[in-house]
Image (tube, grey):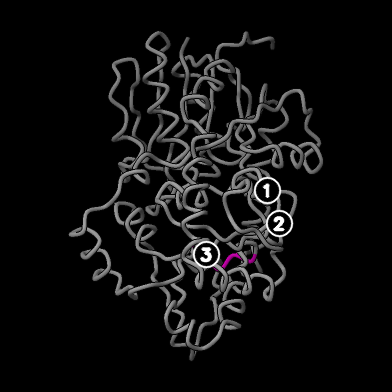
């Protein structure tokens, strides 16, 4: 059987989808030596490609300028040329413009098609909205199977996209192995200096995209006592979302760290006193497991899929309640015993998730007969 996996990393900066691609491919190489794989990658970014070593896995590097158009027209031709039996992509609602072979579509969240205003923001053109919406909706018509990354996402796919629940398999993600390795003192000192980090700090990671809810965390931090804010400043890593910025002007206790290099991210988690993940909508919430694997206590919300991931191993509050978020944050910052308790619970929570199990479930889907 010939399986084509679209692991094309669209941007330089690594996302949860890229980690999904890399780790699934790593595990598939371990458990499957029989089928032949063709893995589409971005020739300009080596994050995914570097993990592919097995002889039955062939890397196909491409450079695509208009990915939406390529998915509609170029990908079907590629599948035909390589006589693919199965197609799969770990990227959200991403697939070919027409059916060529057995097709399995990942659903990381339904926001792009169910809540376009939230996804695109106010700065996106009508043309871009139309193209992206069409590109994401079309593969849903002929996909044989869907992979949702949480029970919540599966429920939303049924509700928002009208999909058959029997055709949706839930496949949980796991933190990348790099987050389980403690950094040396020398590395911590270098990363601390590189990003000009405070001695102790609250760390959060997310763009100014509204659903990431960073603005509420900023309010929560500003509600802390002045002395506590000075002792534990808030450090925000992420990017602008369609031209929108997070307003932290004239606040010396909040800083923007910009993008953190992938190799440095585990160390930043380890250096943080608390990791705050205030999101109001997640298809999964991979940073929660990354922080737990890094032995950092987590403050998060009760929204959407997050309880599935965090379990009882984090302090969870309502996403739209800055006062409640501030109170929980203060508890964590003032009580080292509570932080240690969450660290231990977080280590146990990460063991509930497995890339090996995820790969085994995907391989089972690949192996099902094509009934079309």
Reading the image, the residue beneath label 1 is 133
Q: Look at discs 2 and 1 and give the one toward the viewer.
A: 2
Reading the image, the residue beneath label 2 is 116
Q: Residue at x 69, y 46 (%)?
A: 110
Q: Look at discs 3 and 2 and give the one toward the viewer.
A: 3
Q: Is residue 155 left or right of residue 329?
A: right
Pointer 2 and pointer 1: residues touching (CB < 8 Å)?
Answer: yes
337 or 151, nearer to the observer: 337
Reading the image, the residue beneath label 3 is 207
237 or 322, nearer to the observer: 322
Judging from the image, what secondary structure is the residue with disc 1 in?
helix
Q: Quadrant of the C terminus?
A: top right
**Secondary structure mostly taken by the magenta-highlighted segment of the chain:** loop
Q: Quadrant of residue 258?
A: bottom left
Residue that lies at the very extreme toward the front in this rendered image? 337
Residue 170: % across, % down: 65, 30
Q: Quadrant of residue 47?
A: top left
- In the image, is residue 309 part of the stretch drawn in magenta? no
Q: Earlier along the polypeptide chain: callout 3 or callout 1? A: 1
Question: Where does the magenta region start and end?
Answer: 205-210
Q: Residue at x 37, y 28 (%)?
A: 26
Judging from the image, what secondary structure is the residue with disc 2 in?
helix
Q: CA distance from mark 3 to mark 1?
A: 21 Å
Residue that lies at the very extreme toward the left in this rendered image? 186
Q: Look at discs 3 and 1 and give the one toward the viewer.
A: 3
How many neighbours does mark 1 have within 10 angstroms: few (below 14), some (14-19), or many (20 or more)? some
Q: Is residue 124 left or right of residue 336?
A: right
Q: CA distance from mark 3 to mark 2?
A: 17 Å
Judging from the image, what secondary structure is the residue with disc 3 in?
loop
């Amino acid at each position: 059987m010939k399986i084509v996996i679209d692991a094309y990393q669209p941007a330089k900066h690594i996302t949860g989808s890229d980690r999904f691609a890399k780790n699934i491919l790593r595990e598939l190489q371990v458990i499957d030596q029989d089928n032949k794989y063709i893995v589409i990658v971005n020739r300009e970014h080596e994050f995914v490609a570097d993990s592919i070593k097995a002889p039955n896995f062939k890397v196909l590097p491409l450079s695509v300028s208009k990915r939406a158009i390529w998915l509609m027209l170029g990908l079907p031709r590629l599948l035909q040329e390589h006589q693919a039996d199965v197609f799969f992509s770990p990227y959200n609602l991403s697939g070919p413009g027409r059916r060529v072979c057995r097709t399995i579509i990942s659903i990381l969240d339904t926001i792009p098609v169910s809540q376009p205003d939230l996804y695109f923001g106010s700065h996106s053109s009508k043309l871009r909205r139309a193209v992206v919406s069409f590109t994401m909706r079309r593969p849903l018509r002929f996909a044989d199977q869907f992979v949702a990354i949480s029970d919540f996402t599966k429920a939303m796919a049924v509700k928002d996209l009208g999909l058959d629940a029997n055709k949706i398999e839930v496949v949980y993600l796991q933190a990348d192995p790099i987050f389980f390795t403690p950094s040396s003192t020398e590395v911590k000192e270098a990363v601390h200096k590189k990003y000009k980090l405070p001695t102790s700090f609250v760390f959060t990671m997310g763009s100014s995209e509204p659903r990431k809810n960073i603005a509420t965390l900023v309010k929560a931090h500003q509600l802390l006592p002045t002395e506590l804010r000075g002792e534990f400043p808030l450090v925000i890593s992420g990017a602008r979302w369609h031209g929108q910025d997070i307003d932290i002007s004239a606040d010396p206790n909040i800083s923007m760290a910009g993008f953190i290099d992938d190799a440095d991210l585990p160390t930043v988690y380890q250096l943080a006193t608390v990791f705050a993940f205030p999101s109001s909508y997640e298809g999964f919430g991979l940073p929660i497991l990354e922080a737990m694997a890094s032995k950092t206590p987590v403050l998060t919300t009760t929204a959407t899929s997050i309880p599935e991931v965090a379990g009882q191993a984090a302090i969870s509050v309502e996403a739209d309640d800055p006062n409640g978020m501030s109170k929980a944050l203060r508890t964590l910052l003032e009580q080292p015993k509570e932080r240690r308790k969450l660290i231990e619970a977080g280590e146990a929570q990460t063991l509930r998730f497995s890339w090996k199990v995820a790969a085994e479930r995907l391989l089972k889907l690949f192996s099902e007969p094509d009934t079309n």
